[in-house]
Image: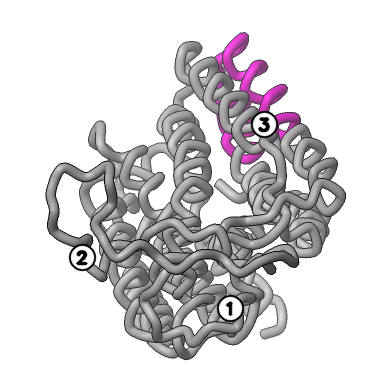
Amino acid sequence: MTRRRTGRAQAWAELLRVSALFSVPGDALAGAAAAGARPGRGTLCAIGASLCLYEAGMALNDWADRAEDAAERPHRPLPSGRIAPGAALAASTALTAAGLALASRAGRPALAVATALAATVWAYDLGLKHTPAGPGTMATARALDLLLGATASTSATGATASTGRTASTGRKGGPRHRAVHALPSAALLGAHTYAVTAVSRHETDGGSTRTPLAALAVTLAVAAAAWGEALGARPGTTVSSPPGPPAPAPHPHPHPALPSSRPLPSSWPLPSRRLLPVRRPGRSRGLGPLLALAYARTPATLLLHAALNPSAALTERAVGGGIRATIPLQAALAARAGAPGTALALLGLVPAARALARKVSPT
């Protein structure tokens, strides 16, 4: 009985690819850092929702590919008969519902992002994966996951933002505006995911030299972008004005550069010197480049090997390296946003992910 339970647990671990789970929490944490929020209850809800939706995608992926896996990877849990297809589909449905429920605890904006993420995951697994839109769809899902963390961390029921402003406001420095600051980080994470997904399309048969080389170029470009200087203060951090005479009152007339004589709409966010980020060179400027190098080093050698010898085994190893590289990339993005503590905490997940990957393949 004990051996049967152990075998069943192993089968579910393979189906859900639990060794890849360590790459998920960093999405929400990097999103919170980019949006200028301290990790809090909303961030925890986003992490829980991300984990559920990620595992829902893993189960649904094998359910949708069960016929293909029977021919190409008969050792997988579904074609080998260790898990019934109906159980995998039920698990995917339940995990999706759980993920949306957790996201709803962080507010309606977070639920809206999580709903878009869930729809993207299901669309990818049920139809788009084997089309040219597959890598782009997966990249969109990963970018939405980071934006989920940014939105949940700055929502009214989530963590209190570092500015101390009320989270229900939509003004400059409010949650809606600060979540926009996470878009560049989401784009970099999406680009990395696109490259890894493109390579994964050849992991069962190999035969591609150009795709690993292109993925290597994308990896180096993302690392160069993540190398950028750390911003120091969070995007919504207010800046105290230096002592001196008070600033003059705003001019009552329209902006002179505008051709129209009508005043600007009150909803337009005008730039304010008191809301610009502050550069604090000593906080994380040196950490960001180191983490960018760590990110690039993880998949670069494996991608080069897969390009020189495009076998299925080396291609699969390159995909696994790309998945593990997600963690140092998330850490680099957090450091770049001025959150070195979050970056170091994420980096601590790398040894655990590597150790578990030796027991359960992330691909």
| 114 is higher (above) or lower (below) than 271 | below
Disc 1 residue type? Answer: Ala
Q: In which quarter of the image is residue 145?
A: bottom left
The range drawn in magenta is 296-321
Task: Report whether residue 307 is seen.
Answer: yes
Disc 3 residue type? Answer: Pro
Task: Verify whether residue 260 appears in magenta.
Answer: no
Give SS at disc 2. Answer: loop
Task: Verify whether residue 308 appears in magenta.
Answer: yes
Residue under the image location 42 percent in, 81 percent down: 103
Q: Quadrant of the N terminus?
A: bottom right
Total residue callouts: 3
The spot of residue 191 in percent (x, y) is 47, 37
Residue under the image location 71 percent in, 39 percent down: 229
- Principal secondary structure, stretch drawn in magenta: helix
Residue for badge 2: 265
Residue 299: numbered disc: 3
Residue 161: numbered disc: 1
Task: Report whether residue 82 is seen.
Answer: no
Q: Distance between the residues labelled 3 and 2?
A: 49 Å
